[in-house]
Amino acid sequence: MADSDHHADQSPHADRTHQALSVRDACVGYGPVRALRHVTLDVPEGAVVAVLGGNGAGKSTLLRALSRTLSFHGGALTSGTIRFAGRRVDGLRPERVVAAGISQVPEGRRVFARMTVADNLRAGALGSTGSRAAKAGALARVHELFPVLADRAGQRAGLLSGGEQQMLAVARALMAAPRLLLLDEPSLGLAPLMAARIADTIREINAQGTSVLLVEQNAALALRLASYAYVLDVGEVALEGPAAELAASDEVRRRYLGVVDETAAADATRALDTPPSLRRWEADR
Ligand SMILES: Nc1ncnc2c1ncn2[C@@H]1O[C@H](COP(=O)(O)OP(=O)(O)OP(=O)(O)O)[C@@H](O)[C@H]1O
Ligand SMILES: [Mg+2]
């Protein structure tokens, strides 16, 4: 419905109508604690966008603002707007956000430990407005992505390994058939092999048409998955740019990303063999 795309432009931010998520000037406080200051961020439809930053930078706060779950943590959006597919979502109740197509996998892979895997997945479909057939379709898709969850359907979720619990947490969010998936540190505490599997799955979920906003402290992993990234520092966007450029920047690596593994550095160098899009404006005379 938005009418802002009448003038086509080549810049990555030009096509506003198809922009899945648009956050403008968001400020969040937990009582007197100001956790986000004037954060502006976009997730274009179909994209994987990463948000990096150290402990306490405000990454989880951002996702809570999007899923409208801040109040459960004593926080509130104090100013700014959040739009999804052109529609304001910053006044909605959390279940309406899910119905609008945004699902969150919260920090710490919280699954219902005493419930079975199958019941955890059923709980994930509760927020969905889809038909019975759509829910069956979502379950089939989730079982295809994570066959282990089909094998363990009757088992209590608390007995799954850490990596399997993370899979279940992601699968539960997918049961609502989201158009945008919010992931809060999905690789945290996982062995490298399991983290790599989660990364593959994120890629697959995205390839099937779901946009992803990925919050990670594991910058190397996040920058491999994302096309664009933001760095949060004490509640503010300190840096943003195409993921490959952020990964390749010495300053970013030193100041914000800590030690980046050699694979990531090599990937970034290879990615830069294609001209960086930040400089695309130079082509326009
Ligand atoms: N429930 C809360 N009440 C008060 N302050 C909070 C609450 N949750 C977070 N904060 C504060 O808000 C700021 C941002 O926290 P947030 O949890 O969003 O950071 P984060 O980037 O997700 O960090 P981490 O990487 O450790 O998960 C921090 O200063 C934190 O102490
Ligand atoms: Mg966090």
Image (cartoon, helix red, strand yellow):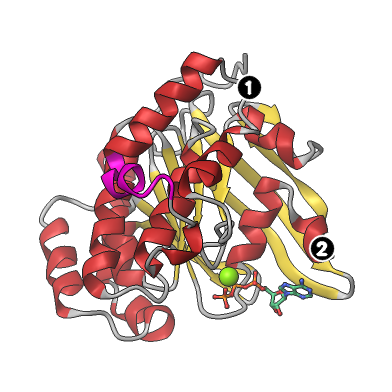
User: Of the residues shown, which amino acid type is indicated by label 2?
Assistant: Gly
Q: Which residues are magenta?
A: 145-154
Percent coordinates x, y for residue 267 in the rendering = 15, 64
Looking at the rendered image, the quarter that the N terminus falls into is: top right
Q: Residue at x 28, y 36 (%)?
A: 144
Q: Which residue position is annotated with label 1?
A: 129
Q: Is residue 37 above or below residue 147?
A: below
Q: Residue at x 12, y 70 (%)?
A: 266
Query: Quick check: can you spot residue 87?
Result: yes
Crowd band around label 2 with a 10 angstrom C-alpha radius: few (<14), some (14–19), many (20+): many
Furthest residue toward front: 154
Percent coordinates x, y for residue 114 in the rendering = 58, 59
- The image quarter containing residue 84 is top right
Dot 2 beta carbon under 8 Å from ligand 1: yes
Asked if residue 235 lies in the magenta stretch, the reply is no
Location of ligand 2 given as a quarter of the image: bottom right
Q: Which mark is residue 75?
A: 2
* Badge 1 or badge 2: first in the primary sequence: 2
Identify the element where label 1 is drawn: loop
